Amino acid sequence: MLKAFLSFSIICCSYVAQAQNYVQINSGDSEGDIIRKAASVRPTARQLNWQKLEVTGFLHFGINTFTGKEWGDGKESPSLFNPTKLDTDQWVQVAQKAGINLLILTAKHHDGFCLWPTNTTDYSVKNAPYLNGQGDVLKSLAQSCKKYGMKIGVYLSPWDRNAKSYGSDAYNEMFRNQLTEVLSNYGKIDEVWFDGANGEGPNGKKQEYNWSSYYDVIRKLQPEAVIAVMGPDVRWVGTETGYGRDTEWSVVPANNLDQNSIADGSQQQMNIQPKGDMSLKDVGGRANILKAKGLVWYPAETDVSIRPGWFYHAQEDAKVKSPEKLLDIYFHSVGKNGVLLLNIPPTTEGLIHAVDAENLSSWKGLRDKIFNNNLLLGQEVKLVKNGVRKKLKEGGEQIWTSKSDDKELIFEYKAKSPLRFNVLQLGEFIQWGQRVEKFEVQIRNNNAWQTIKEGTTVGYKRIVVLPETSSTHIRIKIAQSRLAPFVDKVGLYYYDDIVKLDGKAHK
């Protein structure tokens, strides 16, 4: 047993030492070779830290807040921007009570209005009545985040409907200068968020964005920041409903993987946005990776607004998503191997509305009510099949795996009295990759194991609503894995209002 454990430890250390977030596929690779390569791809340190956040927040705030628009045209007067009670401490406190771990501010939206006193344009808070032109919303938020231990991100729109240089090389330089300002003067930035909007500027031209030069600025000034979603670190899940895929792989095909796209360094990584069809129902399944030129760790961010719109509109005060709806979204975003980016737009006063704040707090209460009571803790468990290994500790985390690349792992629980449950949570130790392709939940019925639920991918976290069940004999089965699975989360839970979770991707 000691020899086997030492061998396993050596293999684990080798995995960590060789970790990189991409792999090239050669023309002579067999199907088995490609599957092994897919199982070997791992997140960078910044990608892993981002995934562990689970829930992040968006703060859509700017000129649109005062015009009632969603997309401004860049012609709105800076005199409109005048929040009279702006309180970024309140933003952060509301977010923390909701279990949100990072806040992203729309420092510049498509209208081009900047929420910091930039030197690149006059179209900013320095020409607004807010604090007599001495205001700096980004600085205020950065200070509040530091005060309360909240991580911070910035949204900076490349599309600028106000900049006269938009559509020329000069604009790329202007945009790099804007990035330099926000990444140099406000402390540590944890995420830089770009969308793909690319419309016309005031001169009727469209801009050819120099993405690689933008990434270079970010990597130089904030090397630990993830770049999403038009970037190399994080991709968009493909919908703004908050509902992710039933099968969500973080390892996906990249058809532009070559030496020009790979950054050298101790944490090997892609340094351009991976190219491939990310809109498929199963982006990283076997059918797709077997045709790929390369594979890359490129996890999904799932975004949605707590309101129908992204900016605050008073007429939507009665349309704020309920705690139960937010819980359902959590199950289908974080619970489907994604990170949830939830938008909570401040009002014209500069505050998070009381209804939003109350629903966010109640949502956190629901999550705590469910997941603070893992029914499997303390229950007798047996790891079935001769390939199953003992659990291993690394950094205080519990990990279960199997030897000799056995692709099946079964947890068999025997309770002293029947357990009543309707929610399953699983998780993989993604530091060593994503591998699980199929899992099942079983109970023993008439001396035979009966499957009550099955699913596909797990990833960092998988949450599944089960039919309400009561049993003393329960199996959690990893039925198929690309290589030996690494599992670090196993739990069964009960939620008494499960009927309120509709599982539907609607707002």
Image (tube, rainbow, N blue to C red):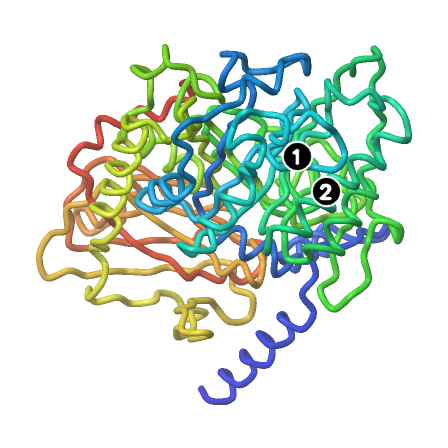
Q: Residue 156 carries which label?
A: 1
Discs 1, 2 touching: Cβ within 8 Å = yes
- Examine the rendered structure and indicate whether residue 463 appears above or below residue 428: above
Residue drawn at x 27%, y 29% as measured from the top left: 324
Q: Nearer the viewer, residue 215 or 172?
A: 172
Quadrant of image for the C terminus: top left
**Callout 2: SS:** helix
Please state the horizontal and vertical placement of residue 124, each as a whole percent of the image.
65, 29
Judge left or right: residue 137 versus residue 203. Answer: left
Q: Tell me which amino acid carries mark 2.
A: Leu
Judge left or right: residue 483 versus residue 353. Answer: right
The quadrant in which residue 502 appears is top left
Judge left or right: residue 266 versus residue 325. Answer: right
The quadrant in which residue 422 appears is top left
Residue drawn at x 51%, y 32% as measured from the top left: 131
- Examine the rendered structure and indicate whether residue 55 appears above or below residue 59: below
Judge left or right: residue 497 versus residue 294. Answer: left
Q: Mark 2 points at which residue?
A: 179
